[in-house]
Image (spheres, rainbow, N blue to C red):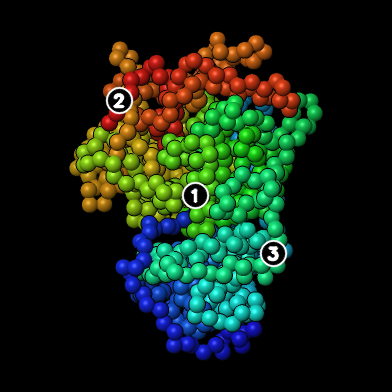
Amino acid sequence: MQGFALARSRSTRRQAWTAGAAVATAALLLPLLSSGPSATADVRPSPSALQREFAAAADEFDVPQSVLLGVSYLQSRWDAHGGAASVTGGYGPMHLTDARTALAEAPHHSHGAEDARGDDARAVRAVDEAAPPETASLPPRLRTLEQAAQVSGIDPGELRDSPAANVRGGAALLADAQKSLGRPPSDDPAQWYGAVARFSGADDVATATTYADDVFDVIRTGQARTTDSGQRMVLAADPGVAPDRAQVAGLGLRTADAARTECPSSVACEWIPAPYEEFGQGDYGNHDKADRPASQSVEYIVIHDTEATWDTTLRLVQNPQYVSWQYSLRSSDGHIAQHVPLKDVAWHAGNWFVNAKSVGLEHEGFLVSPDAWYTEAMYRTSARLVRYLAHRFDVPLDRQHILGHDNVPGTTTATIRGMHTDPGPYWDWAHYFTLLGRPFTPEAGPGSPVVTIRPDYDANRPLYTGCTKASEARWGSPRPEAGGEACTPHGSGAVRLHTAPSESAPLVKDIGLRPGGQDSTTGVNDTGARASTGQQYAVAGRDGDWTAIWYLGQKAWFHNPRTEPTAVPARAQVLTPRDGLAEVPVYGRAYPEASAYPAGVPVQPVSPLPYKLRAGQEYVVGDRLPGEYLYATTFDTAGHRVVRGQEMYYEVQFGHRVAFVKASDVEVTAR
């Protein structure tokens, strides 16, 4: 096999590269599984070096440049990540996977007592610690670097550390896939559909087909961007390419069980059910039967990361004593598994009001390290799934309704410190919403009374600390303290909030996280002084290059220079306490009034959070909705009730997390 790869003579084939024909896209840099790049990783070459390496590798292995570039874009968007591994153990621009090496360095976490249900009517259940990932029998999709080394003759360490070698290894894999299918090398990209599908490593027809379709969509539309190492990359659009999709039939792949799935036709989805099981003595798991949307409206889609490998994620969701979510998404190829029917209520968000009115998506990945990265394949299938869900349930595509788990509020003061912090400050919300077809663009002129947070993801690199302990906040006992190892400087979609217009001013306080009044910290899990891309806030003041917003009942300043803005002007409805009220309470859910509860359903005590919305302050409005409570504490659904009150509430962007206020307490104005 090595002779086949290395003896390949360079062809004279060249493709024209014109930036004007390509579509510019937003940059993407995402978190890292291992602690950092190898000491032998390449230093930054000239800005055109990587483009030349792709051309040379394509010639050496007789692979069309557009195919090689398209595959790489779908895996890494041409980034090298300094030689660090992706969340599934992929390395370099071609995302050659060596999960055995990567997982040996990965953190493994206890999954302890998990209150993802968020309803104190049922007890929190302890779960045995997840076993470390098994590396003895990894599937082929997690061992492509090993295969690339065999067919190219390149040392595995070089394939991990050198972008140029990595590209050659990827080209060798594509050429080997084409040969194994009995197809000759061809200059026509359309003849490489089967090889691209095989490169994905997917073991089912639908995933391999979806992956190949996405690669050829990139080839048709073209792309251009500057990578994380400063490389300017261009893939010229080829709108006429029409691949032979029938080639997938020759791959011998399985057909996944999609009979019960609720997914768009544009993604690969299979049914891996979460168990609905009774344990006896009134206990059961791991979700609740319901009748949505007839009984309750779906208002939110919640984005999570798994803090676990794919196999561990599936093992956990199939454990009846664990929690649940509707969908899991695999990083390596964007494959989707559905676990809970959309009509039923999964236990994922830690807030029962949100759970009852939401769909939860878990993305294979880790918050802990800033250089671990998700693939473009997963971002794209996730965005298509969210668009499908938003259309089905009439959920607006905005950050008041597409929430991170770290935006979900605690229901009571006692639960605030235990709320989760994923997907964290390294999730690229700007790129995600561009894929959703709702990019965050200016909606008003300079000086607008409302802003949308929108830093340049690549250039915005706030220092975070605590990366060695970060994942404890996802599954174990969350503590929003700083300390521990400094995180590798990395692009981020979050901005830091200060008490005054100065970098040296203390960070704003979050009395829910720190009742003693201590300042917030730079901890990667500390959400107390953080505003995230797409979130909207009312402006509280401006001072030179600084903008103040109303945040957790106080004025919070962030650096927002005109030359490099971290927010864009916006229009929105805002609310403030009605005349005569100095302050109004803030809640973690919308409560029905006591008179709304039928006989036999205990009245939920109204429990304000420790924050106050004060006169003169304004907050951006999300939904207007009634107080509601799903009473579901038994396996037998006959006793379940949806309690819906007459008291109306507004959802507001109150801090990093959303909150709720009574409509009768406030006045709403368009800004």
Q: With 584 as the anchor, is 199 left or right in this view?
A: right
Q: Are marks 1 and 2 in contact (CB under 8 Å)?
A: no
Q: Is residue 287 visible?
A: yes
Give, as a three-letter code, the residue at label 2. Thr
Most foreground residue, 333 or 548: 333
Q: Residue furthest right?
A: 280
- Assign a secondary structure to mark 1: helix
Q: CA distance from mark 1 to mark 2?
A: 32 Å
Q: Position of residue 534 (x, y in %)?
A: 38, 43
What residue is disc 2 on? 669
> Is residue 324 visible in the rendered structure shown here?
no
C-alpha separation, residue under disc 3 versus residue under disc 2: 57 Å
Say what secondary structure mark 3 lies in.
loop
Q: Secondary structure at mark 2?
A: strand
Q: Residue at x 66, y 43 (%)?
A: 339
Up-down: is 130 above or below 535?
A: below
The amino acid pointed to by label 3 is Leu
Q: Position of residue 592 (x, y in %)?
A: 53, 17
Would you name the residue on which mark 3 appears?
Answer: 253
Circle on res. 383: 1
